[in-house]
Every structure is written in structure tokens, then in C-alpha cells.
Image (cartoon, rainbow, N blue to C red):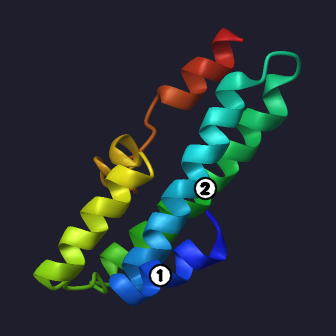
Amino acid sequence: MDMKAVRQMYNDVHPDEAYNLACLSELSMTFRRAEQEMVTPAPAWQDFVDRLRFYQTERALVTSAGDLPVLTPVQERRKQEIIRDFGLERFYAVHPARWGGGIVPAKVLAR
């Protein structure tokens, strides 16, 4: 995600949602990289798992603190456009604190 896109998200949706979407984009990128690694998959999967753990912990803290933003209808529509445009549907579909259960370990063990 380039900085112009990130700045635009901060202007279009709540800053916390923009951060959330940027993190999901990064997770999506590292997940695709890990899936494509054939010679040495462990470092790529470890990178993904480390980022996922950070994201899950950070989002769980925000959620438990009750700091979730309330978006206007315009902000919500823009957020949905960003999710669609960046292909983040599967990453955004499940609450971040629960996301990834079993998917990564099964892939790592299979390699």
C-alpha cells in the first residue's frame, strides 16, 4: 500500500479503521508471500505469524477497551470499497482476535 492510499484512507474513514485496513493489507501481502515460498517456507510463514500475532493482540486490546470507532454511513461505504478494492474480504470477515485459527499451523506443518 503506498502512502498516498494510506493518507486517503485516513481522510476517508476513521483513523483507527484506516490503521486496521493498512494492517490487514500487510497481512494479506505476507500471507501471499508465504504461500508462494517453496524453497524456504519457514521464514516467510514466521513473518506472517509474527505480524498476525501482533495484529490480533493490538486489535483485541482496542476491542476490549471499547475504543471501536463509530463510522458515518459515508465512512462505512468507503471502508467497504477499500476492503473490496484491496481484496481484504477474508481478512476482514472474522474478528481479528480470532482470525487465522488453524490455517497457518496446518500450512506450516504440511511443508
Residue count near mark 1 (Cα–Cα under 10 Å), binned few <14, some 14–19, many ≥20 = few
Furthest-front residue in this view: 4
Q: Residue at x 35, y 56 (%)?
A: 83
Q: Earlier in the sequence, mark 2 or mark 1?
A: 1
Q: Which residue is mark 1?
A: 8
Above or below residue 7? Residue 60 is above
Residue count near mark 2 (Cα–Cα under 10 Å), binned few <14, some 14–19, many ≥20 = some
Q: Helix, strand or loop at disc 1?
A: helix
- Of 5 and 26, nearer the camera is 5
Image-based side of 34 in relation to 74, left or right: right
Residue depth check, mark 2 versus mark 1: number of the one nearer the observer: 1
The mark total stands at 2
Q: Quadrant of residue 96?
A: bottom left
The answer for how far apart the CA atoms under marks 2 and 1 are is: 17 Å
- Of 30 and 1, nearer the camera is 1
Classify the position of the N terminus by image quarter. bottom right
Image-based side of 28 in relation to 63, left or right: right
Where's residue 22, x and y in %? 53, 66
Image-based side of 69 in relation to 1, left or right: left
Which amino acid lies under the numbered mark 2 shown in the image of this protein? Answer: Glu
Where's residue 53, x and y in %? 58, 54
Image-based side of 28 in relation to 44, left or right: left
Q: Which residue is mark 2?
A: 26
The answer, for residue 14, to whether it is visible in the render is: no
Which amino acid lies under the numbered mark 1 shown in the image of this protein? Answer: Gln
Classify the position of the C terminus by image quarter. top right
Q: Residue at x 69, y 51 (%)?
A: 50
The answer, for residue 1, to whether it is visible in the render is: yes
